[in-house]
Image (cartoon, rainbow, N blue to C red):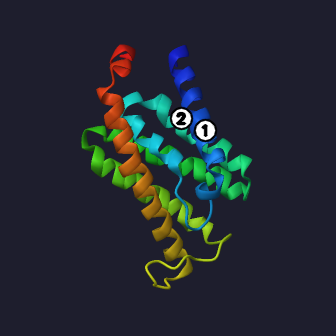
Amino acid sequence: MKTRDISLSAVIAALYAALVIILAPISFGPIQLRVADCLIPLSALFGPPCVIGVALGAFVGNAYWFLSPIDVVLGALANLAASYVVYRYRERLVAASAAASLIIGVVVGGYLWLFFPPPSILGLQLPVWLAMMTSITLSSLVAVMVLGLGLLRLLEESEYIKQLR
């Protein structure tokens, strides 16, 4: 890796962790909106340094707000996989972002039910694991597809990004 790539990974990791920590009340729990996940679609623009950055950022953010080693490790791995999917399938960005949200929802929701009571989804009482997966997937769709794709579009149109290339 080049120095530029390492620096970009570090900046993205720091930004991700900072967003998770600053917005901690809404970044954690059975019903959450992890705004920092809006950085995942940037993998389509910045490539592997972003993939690594969002995974490291999730590791640091989850370690700071320590719930369990399961959350620290699996949360970071979920971000790694989700971000890689966006990078790998960047030519189909909407589908890749939806898949990334599903990965996060299944992985994170797959273990969060161990630590929190299940949320009620639109008044439905689903099985604990399904309720948690649904809740996390829906919030991830908002962060990744709405916020993240919007951010990506703004950056793609930015003169600053054109200079970086």
Look at the numbered discs 1 and 2 and tell me whether their residues touch, using CB distance below 8 Å: yes
Q: Is 124 located above or below residue 110 in the figure?
A: below
Q: Picture coordinates of residue 109 (x, y %)?
A: 54, 65
Tag on residue 148?
none
Which of 81 and 27 lies nearest the eye of the viewer?
Answer: 27
Instruction: Name the outermost residue toward the left.
Output: 91
Which of 53 and 163 lies nearest the eye of the viewer?
Answer: 163
From the image, tell me which residue sits under label 1: 56
Residue count near mark 2 (Cα–Cα under 10 Å), binned few <14, some 14–19, many ≥20: many
Q: In which quarter of the image is the C terminus?
A: top left
Q: Which residue is drawn at 68% across and 58% down?
A: 70
Q: Is 53 located above or below residue 124 in the figure?
A: above
From the image, tell me which residue sits under label 2: 52
Q: In which quarter of the image is residue 42?
A: top left
Q: Residue at x 54, y 75 (%)?
A: 129
Which of 121 and 52 lies nearest the eye of the viewer?
Answer: 121
| Amino acid at the residue labelled 1 | Leu
- Callout 2: helix, strand or loop? helix
Q: In this view, does 22 lie to the left or right of 82?
A: right
| Amino acid at the residue labelled 2 | Ile
Q: Picture coordinates of residue 69 (x, y %)?
A: 72, 55
Count up the numbered dots: 2
Residues at marks 1 and 2, CA–CA distance in whole angstroms:
6 Å
Q: Can residue 2 be spotted in the picture?
A: no
Q: Is 99 located above or below residue 53 in the figure?
A: below
Q: Picture coordinates of residue 103 (x, y %)?
A: 45, 56
Q: Can residue 71 be spotted in the picture?
A: yes
Residue count near mark 1 (Cα–Cα under 10 Å), binned few <14, some 14–19, many ≥20: many
Q: Is 153 located above or below residue 96 in the figure?
A: above
Q: Which residue is drawn at 51% across and 16% down?
A: 4
Q: Which residue is drawn at 60% across and 66% down?
A: 111
